[in-house]
Each structure stands twice: as structure tokens, then as C-alpha cells.
Amino acid sequence: MSEQLIRLVDALEDRASGYLTLDDVTAAGAEDLETAIAEHTLLVDYRQRVDGTPVRLVRLNRRHPLVSRLTSW
């Protein structure tokens, strides 16, 4: 996972009024999210919206060494 992606997701999490979806991160220009998920840098939660449609929520794994080094947490 690139440092640029970590910083992007960190900024998106700071600005989000609720949960951050995989679609939100993709719309912001992020690429290669599946690699970040496989490396456990991004954590994924599979949920269902009120209308029944599936959604994937994402967040940074704040315990990952690279994430903790690059973010203020």
C-alpha cells in the first residue's frame, strides 16, 4: 500500500460525517484497494444498507506499522 493511499484514506476519514465506503475511497481517486485490503492496511466491514443493498465499509488499520507511522493517531 502506498503512502499516498494511506494519507488519502486518513483525510477522508477525518472529513467523513459517518462511515467511509469503498466507493467513497474509489471516487476520491484511490487505486489498488484490493492489495491494501490483502495487506491488512485497510480493514473492511461488509454491511447492508437500510434499503437492503450491500455496502463495504473501510477504515485504516491504525495498528499497522506503516499507518501508525504516517498518521497522527
Image: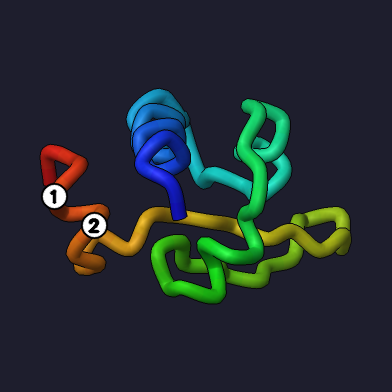
Image quadrant assignment for residue 66:
bottom left
Quick one: 36 or 28, which is closer to the camera? 36
Residue at the spot x=13%, y=50% of the render? 69
**Whole-percent x, y for residue 71 in the image:** 19, 41
Q: Are marks 1 and 2 in contact (CB under 8 Å)?
A: yes
Image quadrant assignment for residue 8:
top left
Q: Which residue is mark 1?
A: 69
Quick one: 39 or 26, which is closer to the camera? 39
Say what amino acid the circle numbered 1 marks: Arg
- 46 vs 43, left or right, is right
Question: Regarding mark 2 in the picture, which secondary structure is present there?
Answer: helix
**Whole-percent x, y for residue 7 in the image:** 35, 34
**The N terminus is located in which quarter?**
bottom left
Measured Cα–Cα span from mark 1 to mark 2 = 5 Å
* Vertical position of residue 21 compared to residue 27: above or below: below
Say what amino acid the circle numbered 2 marks: Leu
Which mark, residue 52?
none
Q: Which residue is mark 2?
A: 66
